[in-house]
Image (cartoon, grey):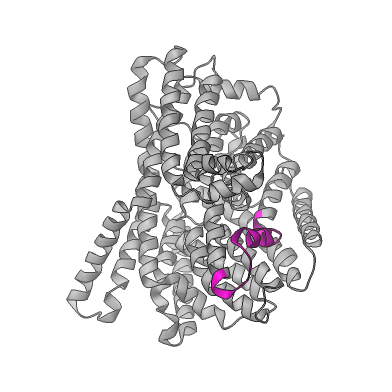
Amino acid sequence: MVTNARAEKPGKVALKMAVSAVLFAGLCAAASRLAGGAEHGRWYSIAPPLLAIFLAFLTRHVIFSLGLAFLVGGLLCHVPEAPLFAGSWSHGYLAAGAMLRATAADVGNLKILAFIPPVFVMIELIIASGGFNGVVLWLMRWIRGKRSAQTQTAVLGVLCFIDDYANAIIVGSMMQPVTDRFRISREKLAFIVDATSAPISGLAIVSTWIAYEVGLFGTVSAELGFGRGGYAMFFDALSYRFYCLFMILFVFVNILAGRDFGPMRRAEAKAEGGGLPTADDGAPALRVEGRALNAVIPLAAFLGFHVCGLWLDGGGPAKLAAGGSPGSWVYWQDVIGHAENSTVMLAGAAVFGLTVALACGLLTRALPPRAVGRCFCNGVKRAMMPACVLVLAWSLKRSCDTLQTGEFLTGILAERISPLAFPAILFAVASLTSFATGTSWGTMAILIPTGIPIAFAMDGGVYGLTTMISLGAVLDGAIFGDHCSPISDTTIISSVSADCDLMQHVRTQLPYSLSVAAVALACGYIPSVFGVGWAYSAAAGAAAMATLFGVVILCRRPSAL
């Protein structure tokens, strides 16, 4: 993965460190004050994720930041109980080691890690056999500039709605040569990939996310007696998924306007001036002639294997025999909703795609046999960085689970919320929790069982408007924080697939995500509580984005399109 670290003046570095230290201390002091009694949990449970985030922004060394924060998390599990006792410190170090071992041995984590090396080897084989170069040459017939290149990238992201990981890998890897050719920054590519992965998969009624979301809804419905099924609640909440809907709209408005702001504008200006990073040394070069089928066939095999695997795992044949129709959305909702091994299918799809890519390259004689070993080595080497970051991020999450970071954040805020402001603040709490812990699914698992009963009580013990808006707020807040957190697996994979430095991706994407979150709050969650219809909120959100980019257009000179 390419890094963009650059030297900074000592005075600027010292100022950043001082400001970060003050902010860190202030947030910890505020948490301690808000915690009050022991019933809210341990205030210092927020220290590890905060430390990881601040260090990552300061140093731009993600592995160091995650490793140190994770170690601090292990120490905080024991040291505060007896800080002057040497045994507490040794127990803390042992706890950190145990968490790391447990993370590395976790079956669910291993299933995700198993798919990363074969995917990168597949990509190396496709590049070496001229596949991506062929796709570029084919796309050039319709792409005439930066705007159309970005539009193609966004449309591909919307179409790959089945899974966020598959989405990021396919779209980022396929479109990188195209966006490079039109001098679109890697940061902009990573943003488009990230903004059309989790937000799309979270909204799609047929995706690997749907089973998890519906399962959580079904559980809370059974406990509180809503009388609604999980799918019915999902569709109830769909109209209140303002962040995801506005983020997708933002991507296309941004492309149409042809303007950027904040750090993204500087990244685009650098790319326009020829500042794109070069590929890693030793990577196979693109073949001039290009063979698009050497990319299309393996990627189609990868996606097809994944969908077929989900179909088989979810009992598709039995449901078909029972009279289900493959042309019905309900049929596919039911099938994918019952798939229990989506990550296994993803790993199998990666191996299958690798095999097909190898066969295509050799059969077309576009891939020299002597280059195969180099492709495997380069692919495995490229996979090591994201794999290490993911393991450390998961270990940090495990320490947060032990310290009950999510429960603490929920507990200190739940009693301080007005009924009319509850969905908006629930969105903010979910955003903060997922940003701090780096997990959208974990945030959903924490806040749906704890926040939805509060909304239900505010509705007077009936399944009403506040409850439905709150369902959407939790899901969207979880995706917002996960979307821009430097310790999130989807953020990491999006940056890797676009070959963009992780912290540069986070720095450039964060202002855009915050802008969309502000629009979602102002035009969506707050008005909806007062009965404003979805259509009016959507229109207001679109107008707000048009105004935002109108101001940017008036204040900035146009870029080349």
Q: Residue furthest left?
A: 87
Which secondary structure class fits the magenta region best? helix
Asked if residue 65 is positioned above or below residue 348 in the image, the reply reads below
**Residue located at (59% from left, 39% from top):** 160
What residue is shown at x 57% (from left), y 40% (from top)?
Answer: 320
* Residue 396 appearing in the image: yes
Task: State the residue lying farthest toward the bottom.
Answer: 37
Residue situated in front as seen by the camera: 464 or 251: 464
Q: Residue furthest top?
A: 365
* Left or right relative to 102: residue 31: right
| Residue 409, above or below 377 | below
Q: Over which residues does the magenta segment extend?
A: 222-244
Image location (x, y in percent) of residue 552: 74, 51
Residue 5 appears in the rendering? no
- Left or right placement of residue 384 versus residue 53 in this view: left
| Between 453 and 195, the one nearer to me in the picture | 453
| Vertical position of residue 77 compared to residue 97: above or below | below
Q: Position of residue 473 (x, y in %)?
A: 63, 65
- Res 376 → quadrant: top left
**Is residue 16 shown in magenta?**
no
Q: Nearer the viewer, residue 27 or 103?
A: 103
Quadrant showing the C terminus: top right
Q: In terms of image quadrants, where is residue 142?
A: top right
